[in-house]
Amino acid sequence: MMALPRFDSRLLALPVLLALLLPALPGFAQDRPILPDEEKFARPDDDFSLRFCVDPRDPGWQFDQAVGEAIADALLLEPRVHVLTDTANRAEFNDIYRHLRIDCAVFFGFKLLAGGYPEWLTVTRSYLETGYVFVAKAPAPATLGDIARGEALGASVGSSADFRLVQYNNSLPAAERWKRFPMSTDELALEAVMKDTVAAALVWAPSFFELSHTTRPEFADLAVVAPEPLTLPPVEVGALLLSRDTFLRANIDEAITALIADGTIERLLTELGMPGSAPD
């Protein structure tokens, strides 16, 4: 990502700012990247398969893969998944274009924020609603409002939820504000809670789930805190395609709608323990 942490589900920093400041824009102008010797690349024939990418740095990548496979099955296509291996790179627009040009036709696992992507990209309808959560040591306060003013709050910097927290906190009288400690990753924010550096942390829910069930089992002792009086709307997650692939996008959208209606998305969420719900 152009410069957000990899565990923030690959949303570029520039689109975040544009989406927050210019929410009415359908997209923003940016020249399509050009690959070296691009004319030598021919996209593989996709008549009988659905080639899609997932990023293992993304905490929801296994759910994304399961959704991609279910979509392929609904379209009577063979699923052909490309799991990114060049994970040292950040998912900048040039990288996204390269993958969509060479490795796959669809790239799953992106937050769908209005105005968030350039015009040479298009997005599917959402297949997941999830979001950001406050997390504190148990026994945790019931709500954010129950945390004493003046206490420190950690937050992964640059997210839409962090932007809302900053706006709300700055709207309060100085004596009634919390201290905000910006963190570069969700993992560092959660570590700060464990060390009592902050009273609570605002993190991406899939990151909290993934970390507490894999590399950081000690995080499972932390508890979710309701955000009131702050409002944290759900974040929709979908997939990216090149804007020229309108027919494929329309078919994927129909498949997602069918998978939501027949309960497949909810079943996958339950099986994989992914925090969130199927969109309406």
Image (cartoon, rainbow, N blue to C red):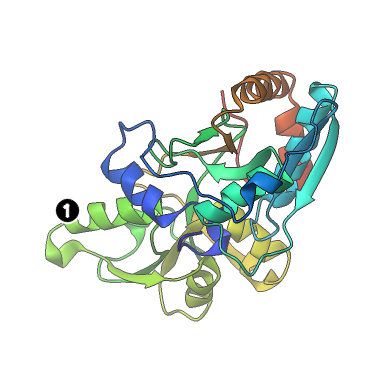
Q: Is residue 117 left or right of residue 248?
A: left
Residue at which label 1 appears: 171
Q: Is residue 261 above or below residue 215?
A: above
Residue situated in front as seen by the camera: 263 or 151: 263
The residue under the point 77% across, 49% down is: 82
Expressed as whole percent of the image width and height from the top left, the position of residue 138 reads 54, 66
Q: Is residue 129 left or right of residue 210?
A: left
Q: Is residue 205 left or right of residue 45?
A: left
Residue situated in front as seen by the camera: 178 or 167: 167
The residue under the point 71% across, 71% down is: 215
Expressed as whole percent of the image width and height from the top left, the position of residue 275 reads 63, 46
Expressed as whole percent of the image width and height from the top left, the position of residue 141 reads 43, 59
Q: Is residue 57 above or below residue 198?
A: above
Q: Secondary structure at mark 1?
A: helix
Q: Amino acid at mark 1?
A: Ser
Q: Quadrant of residue 106?
A: top right
Q: Quadrant of the C terminus?
A: top right
The residue under the point 58% across, 35% down is: 242
* Few, some or many residues within 10 Å of mark 1 (<14, 14–19, 20+): few
Residue 86 seen by the camera: yes
Residue 274 seen by the camera: no
